Image (tube, rainbow, N blue to C red):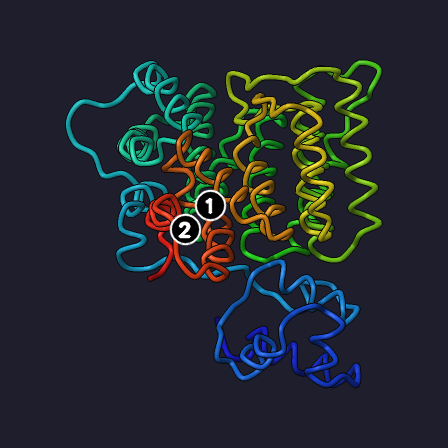
């Protein structure tokens, strides 16, 4: 991050404009004085999204005023496993020999989707990287564009998860260019909006999701389930960006509308032949719980989790379990947090290893423990917690 856009310099300038000392800002925001000092003195190059939001709220500015991006892309050894996938989306295929066919590439798509939904990221990268090379040279028929767009959206989602943001943006831009219809395009935009949130580009995320939600809004009297799902996800992404940017009213309005859409649908819509996510009341409930984490209301997260019996339907389930673990740490229930993280690790170890959120949650637990249990040490290794 460039010095002139460092969060610390913006934080210092706005704090002074508000007439606050560092200590007064610490009291108003709930952020430690030592952390504020480190940020302003550029001893830290970045900070968590939740910390930036608290500081922005105390200073009465939008989070995006302070923040350019949430975290930097992993480099060196951390990026090594994803280099083949980065290369596949960013560099045109150079092939000799037998030309691939649309039918041949399409036959492997179910295997790619299986690995994606099972969160087997290593296997998925091994499948995707060469298949994208094949898809590159399929030509410009409708069928070729369709399968290429779908593969690129999956690649963009994976690269976003592992914080390879530049390559993720390239993949999603190419996927949108090849999108065969507006429903596929809306799904790609939903993934892109999430990418922008991960980068801390909250205003851009909000504007992108809102514009597309307005464009694809269906007539409710004759909307298909797929149209409702596409619109609902865009509304939820707009709400997520608004909430993190301290636009609570707009966030509440868009989430309320998304909830209404899920009620109209009346059921959890499973992943379609091309859609990467579920959609319905369960998905909305999980995203609403995430809202309570951002607003420092952990008790409401746990109440919601207890009230529905841990129904595993939505593709957001594992992310929701991290919110539950975070809520436990916010209430100093560290044993319960570790139990939840251990459950996620048992079900989706590769996915958990790529989640900075999980690393931050476990880091909070470790900081407050004199000694670590074997279970905690296993989790620390699994999420790559620094020694």
Q: In this view, does 290 lie to the left or right of 144?
A: right
Residue 77: % across, % down = 26, 56
Residue 143 location, x and y as percent? 44, 19
Residue situated furthest left in the rendering? 97
When asked about the image quadrant of residue 244, the answer is bottom right
Point 72% across, 30% down: residue: 216
Name the element at disc 1: helix
Toward the viewer: 264 or 133?
A: 264
Q: Between 185 and 157, which is closer to the camera in this rendering?
A: 157
Relative to 76, 188 lies left or right: right
- Tell me the quadrant of the picture where the C terminus can be found: bottom left
Q: Which residue is drawn at 46% across and 45% down?
A: 160
Q: Above or below — where is 38 with respect to 166?
A: below
Depth check: 290 or 127 in front? Answer: 290
Q: Nearer the viewer, residue 109 or 281?
A: 281
The image quarter containing residue 141 is top left
Can you tell which mark lies on residue 160? Answer: 1
Helix, strand or loop at mark 2 = loop
Q: Are marks 1 and 2 in contact (CB under 8 Å)?
A: yes
Instruction: From the top left corner, tell me how far across and down residue 42 is, in percent.
Output: 51, 80
Image side of residue 236 versus residue 273, left or right: right
Residue to which mark 2 is pinned: 164
């Amino acid at each position: 991050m460039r010095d002139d856009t460092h969060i610390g310099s913006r934080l210092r300038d706005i704090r002074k404009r508000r007439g606050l000392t560092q200590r007064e800002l610490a009291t108003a925001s709930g952020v430690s004085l030592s952390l504020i000092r480190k940020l302003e003195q550029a001893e830290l190059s970045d900070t968590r999204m939740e910390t930036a939001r608290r500081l922005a709220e105390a200073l009465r500015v939008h989070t995006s005023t302070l923040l350019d991006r949430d975290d930097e892309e992993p480099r060196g050894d951390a990026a090594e496993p994803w280099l083949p996938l980065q290369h596949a989306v960013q560099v045109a295929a150079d092939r000799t020999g037998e030309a691939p066919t649309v039918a041949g590439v399409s036959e492997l798509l179910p295997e790619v989707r299986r690995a994606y939904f099972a969160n087997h990221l290593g296997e998925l990268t091994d499948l995707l990287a060469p298949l994208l090379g094949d898809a590159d040279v399929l030509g410009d028929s409708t069928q070729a564009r369709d399968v290429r767009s779908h593969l690129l959206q999956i690649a963009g989602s994976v690269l976003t998860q592992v914080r390879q943001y530049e390559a993720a943006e390239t993949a999603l831009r190419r996927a949108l260019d090849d999108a065969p219809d507006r429903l596929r395009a809306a799904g790609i935009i939903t993934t892109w909006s999430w990418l922008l949130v991960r980068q801390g580009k909250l205003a851009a995320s909000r504007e992108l999701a809102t514009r597309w939600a307005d464009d694809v809004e269906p007539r409710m009297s004759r909307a298909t389930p797929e149209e409702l799902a596409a619109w609902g996800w865009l509304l939820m992404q707009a709400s997520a960006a608004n909430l993190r940017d301290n636009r609570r009213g707009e966030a509440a309005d868009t989430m309320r509308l998304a909830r209404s859409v899920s009620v109209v649908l009346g059921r959890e819509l499973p992943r379609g032949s091309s859609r990467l996510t579920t959609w319905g009341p369960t998905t909305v409930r999980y995203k609403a719980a995430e809202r309570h984490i951002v607003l420092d209301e952990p008790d409401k997260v746990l109440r919601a989790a207890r009230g529905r019996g841990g129904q595993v339907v939505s593709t957001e389930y594992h992310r929701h379990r991290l919110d539950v673990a975070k809520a436990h740490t916010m209430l100093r229930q560290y044993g319960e947090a570790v139990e939840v993280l251990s459950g996620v690790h048992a079900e989706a170890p590769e996915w958990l290893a790529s989640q900075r959120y999980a690393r931050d949650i476990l880091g909070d637990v470790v900081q407050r423990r004199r000694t670590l249990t074997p279970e905690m040490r296993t989790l620390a290794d699994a999420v790559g917690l620094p020694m």
